Amino acid sequence: MSILEALLLGVVQGLTEFLPVSSSGHLVLGQALLGIRSSGIVFEILLHGATLLAVVVFYRVRLSALAAGLLGREPGAWIYAGKLALATLPAVLLTLALRETLEAQFDRPVTAGLGLLLTGGILWTTRWTLPRAAAPEPSWSAAWWIGCAQALAILPGVSRSGATVGAALALGVAPIQAAEFSFLMSIAAVGGALVLSASDLAAAAGAGSALPLALGFSAALVSGLAALALFVRLLRTRAFHRFAYYAWALGALALLLTW
């Protein structure tokens, strides 16, 4: 992978990670359309690490308050952290059970196309769920089901932000709080994936890919911060479902090109 290709894929990852259009789907399709040799799930996870850092920076005040509450043994903080932990479990269990099968999907544009069509369907449901959602945080059962939505979004084409926020809205969580819970719970899930892939990342860096990896990471971080701010702003306008048109169009195009 060249430096230009790494930069381009980094920007694609950053811009699409937080907008509900599936960053993994765009990476898979981008590599296929541009003729870039697949870098596999390692580069994908590294770019997710960059956008994870963007989440930490964007929600630094909320994270600091949560950490202070945990240290101060505040019940509300411990309950919220427990819900975040519970929501992380489905993705962890699925990854441990089917890691090789999931990795293989990142080389299949048809999977990304189908995932994008599913994402569009999830987003379309928010036309009805978003106006009625008002809970300040998810219940324990809602946290579990939001986590199941995150596990589904491991597949390329299924938007993690779209699936989790869509699930949270359907379960009655208010829009801004749904986004906050979605992005905060991604910290543990993506962080765990980075740990599991640490040896692969080190091998890639040692094989002469350190500079492209670093530039791709930086591009994803900067563009991710911009996209995250835009996502929260758009969520307030209650126009979330309009991303469905884009997801459906891109998914259909991917399937057409594959066929």
Image (tube, rainbow, N blue to C red):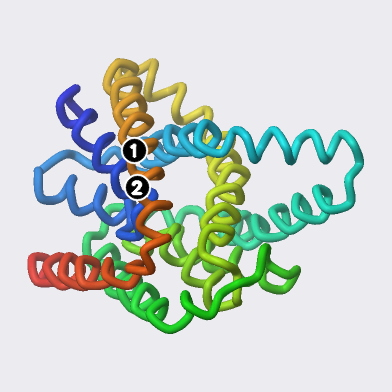
Residue 237, visible in the rendered structure: yes
Question: Farthest front residue?
Answer: 237
Q: Quadrant of residue 34?
A: top left
Q: Which mark is residue 226?
A: 1
* Residue at point 35%, 20% (across, down): 214
Q: Residue at x 36, y 73 (%)?
A: 123
Q: Is residue 107 left or right of residue 155?
A: left
- Circle 2: is it few (<14), some (14-19), or many (20+) Cα within 10 Å? some
Mark 2 and mark 1 residues within 8 Å of each other at the beta carbon: yes
Please, is residue 215 above or below residue 76 in the view? above
Instruction: State which quadrant residue 172 falls in.
Output: bottom right
Coordinates of residue 149 in the picture (x, y in percent): 53, 68
Res 112 label: none
Q: Residue at x 43, y 84 (%)?
A: 128
Is residue 105 in view from this perspective? no
| Quarter the N terminus occupies | top left
Residue picked out by circle 2 = 230
144 with respect to 194 (left or right): right
Figure quadrant of residue 82: bottom right
Left or right, residue 177 beside residue 101? right
